[in-house]
Image: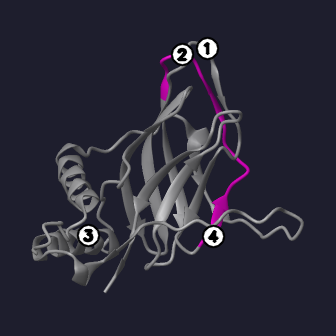
Amino acid sequence: MRDNRNSFPIWIGGVVLALALILLSTRGAGINNPALVQRFTPKPTDPGAPTAPAFQLPQVHLPSLPPGMQQTFTKLRDRFAGGQAVPALTPEASGTRARVKVDEVRRAGDRVHVRGTVTNIADQPLEIPPGAFSFRDSAGVDYTTSGGGATLQPGQSTSFDLGVPLPPDHGLTLILTLPPDPPLEQVLVVATTP
């Protein structure tokens, strides 16, 4: 009996299509709120803090992909490593009060710069407290900052430019935490394994 199941995961095809569309529409964003221009550092481990749940960013095993997809992922990986802007894998995330759109992710030496906008989609002012943005890499390291913060009126947006140190072979996710809402998580880049 013949097995008609497709050995190609459909989500990878969706990611490639999304990347192609994002590449066509990516444009830079101006910085209009210096409070949201921040540099992040690894968060020290607190021995008294509860253990964080296991977290693993998606990884792409290149040899298991069809040749066309291998080429697409390799080109994006090489562009990113060479300092060119690439689209985020999850370009937009929305919660009950905020929408975060990542316009570009770019490597500059040992740091990754993330530019985008955050918009208040609620009908009342939105306080973005200091330290609301954080990152987590594919090795499970959290990156935080204690600075920044802004207040957005309903419908108002502001841009951000965030920088985080990231080893070349790690994936990265952006997290916006606005209690009591659940955190908004966006996968920016994935680790590619040969």
Crowding at dot 1, Cα within 10 Å, few <14 / some 14-19 / many 20+, comes out as few
Instruction: State the residue at coordinates (35%, 52%).
Output: 104
Q: Nearer the viewer, mark 1 or mark 3?
A: 1
The Cα–Cα distance between marks 1 and 2, rounded to whole angstroms, is 5 Å
Instruction: State the residue at coordinates (31%, 54%).
Output: 87
Q: Which residue is mark 3?
A: 79
The Cα–Cα distance between marks 3 and 4, rounded to whole angstroms, is 24 Å
In primary-sequence order, the first of circles 2 and 3 is 3
Q: Would residue 193 be visible to someone looking at this image? A: yes
Placement of 193 over or under 146, stated as above or below: below
Q: Which residue is mark 2?
A: 154
Q: Residue furthest front?
A: 1
Q: Would residue 101 be visible to someone looking at this image? A: no
Closer to the camera, 54 or 135? 54
Closer to the camera, 188 or 29? 188
The Cα–Cα distance between marks 4 and 1, rounded to whole angstroms, is 34 Å
Q: Position of residue 30 (x, y in %)?
A: 39, 39
Q: Which residue is mark 4?
A: 141
Circles 1 and 2: CB atoms closer than 8 Å: yes
In primary-sequence order, the first of circles 2 and 4 is 4
Would residue 59 be counted in the magenta stretch? no
Circles 2 and 4: CB atoms closer than 8 Å: no
Quadrant of the image occupied by residue 28: top left
Q: Please give left or right for residue 183 compared with residue 103 in the image.
A: right
Q: Which residue is mark 1?
A: 124
Would residue 150 be counted in the magenta stretch? yes
Q: Which residues are magenta?
A: 140-157
The Cα–Cα distance between marks 2 and 3, rounded to whole angstroms, is 37 Å
The kind of residue tagged 3 is Arg
Crowding at dot 2, Cα within 10 Å, few <14 / some 14-19 / many 20+, comes out as some
The kind of residue tagged 1 is Gln
The kind of residue tagged 2 is Pro
